[in-house]
């Protein structure tokens, strides 16, 4: 049985980004395991525009009634959802920018969170339609925020994942990366070890 894993990176620092380095460590370990396939989507290299009304509106039009422009706009969301559905595990490598997630990642979530497609509203509240998948968050931060009210990022990510039905979420924190070389090196070493443990469970 093959475990298909989608790794999403969002660092604007490119190869100098610590979250990108964590993702690359995950990819290197995962690709070395039998039965694991990895797809990497870099949302900075393949940046999505902010969601606008025309694109949102294209989703509300039946496929056979869409104009050429609407088909092109809807294809962004359709292809990202198709990619998500085709994988068993989603790995989000996420830097913290101003206590939030990168806007590039928000643009991705804006397109994979679609009412009637990846979740639906019921009389008991929203129900996720993306089933049988799990997620990992690789969080890189300059300061130390995990477990405090200043970490608005992790609850936000888990809320959005849960909204579409992904409730099994593991989190690896690499924190204090701007608080001295010793603290940075120790945090990255611990994060890499935690990643190795998650890869072993794939």
Image (spheres, helix red, strand yellow):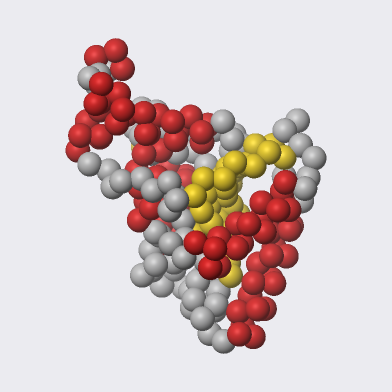
- Farthest right residue in view: 34
Of residue 86 and residue 118, the one placed in the foreground of this image is 86
Q: Quadrant of residue 122?
A: top left
User: Which of the 4 image quadrants contains residue 23?
Assistant: bottom right
* 123 over 202 or under it: above or below: above
Q: Residue furthest top?
A: 64
Horizontal and vertical percent for residue 21? 60, 63
Left or right placement of residue 44 versus residue 177 in this view? left
Depth check: give the residue in front, 192 or 25: 25
Picture quadrant where residue 78 is located: top left
| Residue 157 x, y percent position in the rendering | 45, 54
Residue lying at 67% horizontally and 59% vertically, measured from the top left: 25
Picture residue at 36% right of the left edge, 28% below the top:
75
Residue 35 in the figure: left or right of residue 83: right
Q: Compared with residue 10, is residue 83 higher up or lower down, i.e. above or below?
A: above
Q: Is residue 98 left or right of residue 175?
A: left
- Report x, y in % for residue 101: 40, 60
The quadrant of the image that shows the C terminus is top right
Q: Is residue 180 above or below residue 56?
A: below
Residue 23 in the figure: left or right of residue 150? right
Residue 121 in sight in this render: no
How many numbered marks does the figure carry? 0
Residue in view at x 29 percent, y 12 percent: 64
x, y (%) of residue 161?
Answer: 47, 46
């Amino acid at each position: 049985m093959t475990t298909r894993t989608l790794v999403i990176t969002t660092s604007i620092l490119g190869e100098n980004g610590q979250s990108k380095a964590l993702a690359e460590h995950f990819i290197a370990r995962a690709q070395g395991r039998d039965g694991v396939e990895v797809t990497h989507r870099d949302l900075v290299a393949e940046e999505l525009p902010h969601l606008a009304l025309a694109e949102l509106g294209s989703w509300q039009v039946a496929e056979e009634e869409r104009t050429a422009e609407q088909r092109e706009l809807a294809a962004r969301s359709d292809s990202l959802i198709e990619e998500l559905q085709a994988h068993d595990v989603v790995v989000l490598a996420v830097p913290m920018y101003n206590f939030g997630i990168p806007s590039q990642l928000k643009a991705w979530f804006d397109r994979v969170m679609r009412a009637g497609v990846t979740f639906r509203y019921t009389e008991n509240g929203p129900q996720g339609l993306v089933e049988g998948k799990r997620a990992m968050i690789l969080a890189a931060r300059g300061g130390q925020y995990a477990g405090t009210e200043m970490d608005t990022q992790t609850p936000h990510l888990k809320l959005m994942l849960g909204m579409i039905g992904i409730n099994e979420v593991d989190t690896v924190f690499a924190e204090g990366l701007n608080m001295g070389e010793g603290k940075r090196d120790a945090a990255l070493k611990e994060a890499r070890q935690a990643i190795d443990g998650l890869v072993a469970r794939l």
